[in-house]
Image (cartoon, rainbow, N blue to C red):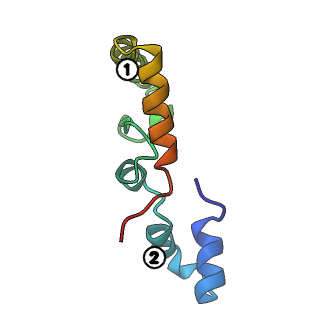
Amino acid sequence: YSVISPESCSSILWRSWEYKEKAAEALKLTAKDMKALNLVDEIIREPLGGAHFDRETTFKTVETIIAETYEALKKLSPKQLVKERMEKYANMGVFES
């Protein structure tokens, strides 16, 4: 979702990679930022230490979320699905001031 890393952004703006946290905040790269901007539908929590430390739990969590989402989407008509998808993508990148 970004064309530049926080380190590169920091180097360009402040001529030092030391401001990478400030750059990351400005770039809105966190899961919470993506959710707030409606770029993602849901945030999937990782097990402590990361998904690679507990793959089985990660797989089960993702499986559950996919199944729940599928069940919800099955209730919509194809016309409604397309309408909602079009609205979602049309609103990406739109900001109010």
Q: Nearer the viewer, mark 2 or mark 1?
A: 1
For badge 2, the amino acid type reads Lys
Point 51% across, 42% down: residue: 89
Q: Which residue is mark 2?
A: 22
Q: Is residue 9 left or right of residue 56?
A: right
Q: Which mark is residue 23?
A: none
Secondary structure under badge 2? helix
Locate residue 65 relative to residue 7 in the image: left or right.
Answer: left
Give the residue at x 43% y 27%.
54
Give the residue displayed 51% in from the left and 74% down from the top. Answer: 23
Which quadrant of the figure has residue 63? top left
Residue 97 image point, x, y percent: 35, 72
Q: Dot 2, crowdedness within 10 Å: few (<14), some or many (≥20)?
A: few
Residue 69 is tagged as 1
Q: How many marks?
A: 2
| Mark 1, other Cα within 10 Å: few <14 / some 14–19 / many ≥20 | few
Please provide percent x and percent y for residue 64: 36, 17
> Looking at the image, which residue is at 64% across and 88% down?
15
Task: Establish if 23 lies above or below 16.
Answer: above
Residue in front for this viewpoint, 51 or 38: 38
The spot of residue 72 in percent (x, y) is 33, 17
Figure check: 3 above or below 91: below
Q: CA distance from mark 2 to mark 1?
A: 35 Å
The part of the image, by quadrant, that contains residue 96 is bottom left
Spot the residue most to the bottom.
15
- What's the residue type where badge 1 is placed? Thr
The image quarter in which residue 50 lies: top left
